[in-house]
Image (spheres, rainbow, N blue to C red):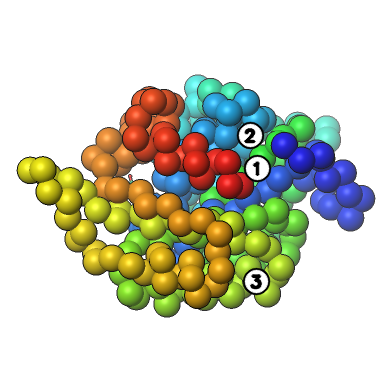
Amino acid sequence: PAKPLFSEQLPAGLQTISNIIAVSSCKGGVGKSTIAVNLAYTLADMGARVGIFDADVYGPSLPTMVSPENRLLEMNAEKRTIIPTEYMGVKLVSFGFAGQGRAIMRGPMVSGVINQLLTTTEWGELDYLVIDMPPGTGDIQLTLCQIVPLTAAVIVTTPQKLSFIDVAKGVRMFSKLKVPCVAVVENMCHFDADGKRYYPFGRGSGSQVVQQFGIPHLFDLPIRPTLSASGDSGMPEVVADPQGEVSKIFQNLGVCV
Ligand code: ADP
C-alpha cells in the first residue's frame, strides 16, 4: 500500500486513508455493489486495512450484503463523529446503518448527507476505502468526486450496447476530474449450462470501452447464482469461497487498484 495521504486540505476524517477507490456504474442493477463489496473483502484478505463507504443513499445495498453484529452506526457525541460498524475486519458505513431506511431527499440534501457520513466518520488508518458510488454521473456523483481525492475508479457495466454509451459517460466524468479508471468489470457476461457457454447480453462492449478509452484492465465476471445468493445472505462470495473462480477474478482486480 502507498503512504498515507495526510494532506492538510483533506477533510479531517479522510486524512488517514491511503487509497480511495470509487466503484461506479451509470445504471443501477449492473452489479456495482456486489463488485465493491467483494473487492473490499479481497483487499482485506490480501492483508490491507479496508473500509467500505456505501454512497448510495437512495438504495443502500451494504446492509443486505454484509451482516455485522452491530447494525447501527454509533455516534461519538463529544467529538461529533461517526464510528463505523464492522464485519470480518472491514469497516462499514452506509445510510442503511443510520437507522432511517431509504431516503426521500432532493439532490443537494443527498450530497450533504453523503459528505457528512463520509468525512465525519472515524475511519482510522486505512490502506483502502472502497466507495460504492450512487449510479449515474449527475450532480451527486460529481460533488462526491470533488470532496474526495479519489486514487482510482473501477467501472462496472454489463455487455449491452446501451450500457457502453453510459459507461463512456462515466469514463469521461472521471477523466475530467483527473481520476484514472484502472479497470472495467463486464459483469454478467456469460453463464455455463449443459456444457455450453451462453452470452445472454451479447459480447464485446467491455473491450470497446477499454480500447476506446485506453483503460488498462478488463475483467469478465460471469453470472453465478452463488454471487447473488451470497449477496443476499450477508456473507460476500469471496469470504464464503476464498478459493473459488470468483475469488480469483477479484484477486486479479485487487492487484490492479
Ligand atoms: P447495483 O449495485 O449495480 O445496483 P447489485 O450489486 O445490487 O447492483 O446487483 C444487482 C443484483 O444482481 C443483486 O441481486 C446481485 O446479487 C445480482 N448480481 C450481481 N452480479 C451478479 C453475477 N455476476 N451473477 C449473479 N448475480 C449477480
Q: In 3D space, how far apart are the residues under numbered discs 3 and 2 (Cα atoms)?
A: 25 Å
The residue wearing badge 3 is 175
Q: Is residue 250 above or below residue 31?
A: above
Q: Earlier in the sequence, mark 3 or mark 1?
A: 1
SS of the residue at dot 1? strand
Q: Nearer the viewer, residue 191 or 54?
A: 191
SS of the residue at dot 2? strand
Q: Is residue 191 above or below residue 158?
A: above
Crowd tier of the residue under label 2, counting other residues whose Cα lies within 10 Å: few below 14, some 14–19, many 20 or above: many
Q: In 3D space, how far apart are the residues under numbered discs 3 and 1 (Cα atoms)?
A: 20 Å
The residue at the point 42 percent across, 35 percent down is 248
Crowd tier of the residue under label 3, counting other residues whose Cα lies within 10 Å: few below 14, some 14–19, many 20 or above: some
> Percent x, y for residue 91?
62, 32
Marks 2 and 1: CB-CB under 8 Å?
yes
Please state which amino acid type lies under the numbered disc 3: Ser
Left or right: residue 202 compared with residue 50 = left
The residue wearing badge 2 is 50
